[in-house]
Amino acid sequence: MPARALPRKHPLFTAAVSATTVLALGALGACSLEEPTTGKSRAAKTTGKSKHGKGTDKQAGTSGGSGGESGPRAAGESAVYRDKGLEVTVAAPARFTPSAYAAGHKSGKQAYKVRVTLVNTGDTKIDTALVTVGAREGEDGETTAGIFDGETVGNGFTGQLLPGKRATATYGFDAAPAAKTLDIEVSVNDFETEPAQWSLSL
């Protein structure tokens, strides 16, 4: 039985498919992610300052000045995503002593707790499990791994955040004893928004 030749695709059809693909990719590339603006926190509580200017479990130190819209935010300031309907606030860091069962803490480092609060200002649910929080410490911006300590530090966000509701999670990070800053980046990871940054004084 003679072999049948496979049908050839029409050149115009191939060109049309290629053009559609290019246009689709171009449209995706043209879509810009939402940049957060800076606003005053409606979620974080006002904190005091200890004698030595260092945060404690009960009192968190204040941060340096705000970098404005283009620079990092200060502790207590919010990253506002108006289109997304989300506000993200990072509080001042507080020193703490990890328990014997904590993971991620390195000997010789100072551990800090950082509270991150999300407020849903929109009219649709937000998946908080997608939110990630990272940190860099010191002038060199060395990446510092997270500390996980029981059910209170490092577990992050879970579940859906309903409109008008807020959610708070506490993260732990190490820093060198001489470090003066802890830079925090919060990413929503939804392919719609840019990450937001904070520079916190230690």
Image (cartoon, rainbow, N blue to C red):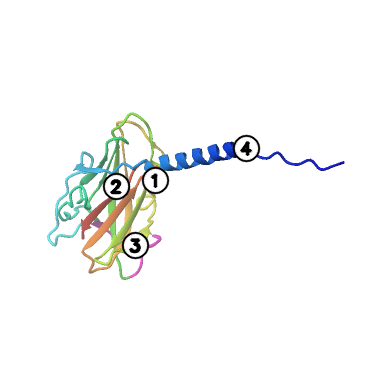
Q: Which residue is mark 2?
A: 116
Q: Which residue is mark 4?
A: 10
Circle nearer the N terminus (2, 4): 4
Residue nearer the viewer, 40 or 115 = 40
The single residue placed furthest to the left in the displayed view is: 51
Q: CA distance from mark 2 to mark 3?
A: 17 Å
Q: In the image, what residue type sits under mark 2?
A: Val
Q: Which residue is mark 3?
A: 144
- Residue 176, how many percent across, how many down? 27, 68
Residues rendered magenta in the picture = 94-107
| Contact between labelled residues 3 and 1, with CB atoms less than 8 Å apart | no
Residue depicted at 16% across the width and 56% down the height = 64
Residue depicted at 73% across the width and 41% down the height = 6
| Contact between labelled residues 2 and 1, with CB atoms less than 8 Å apart | no
Which element carries disc 3, helix, strand or loop?
loop
Q: In the image, what residue type sits under mark 3?
A: Thr
The single residue placed furthest to the top in the displayed view is: 123
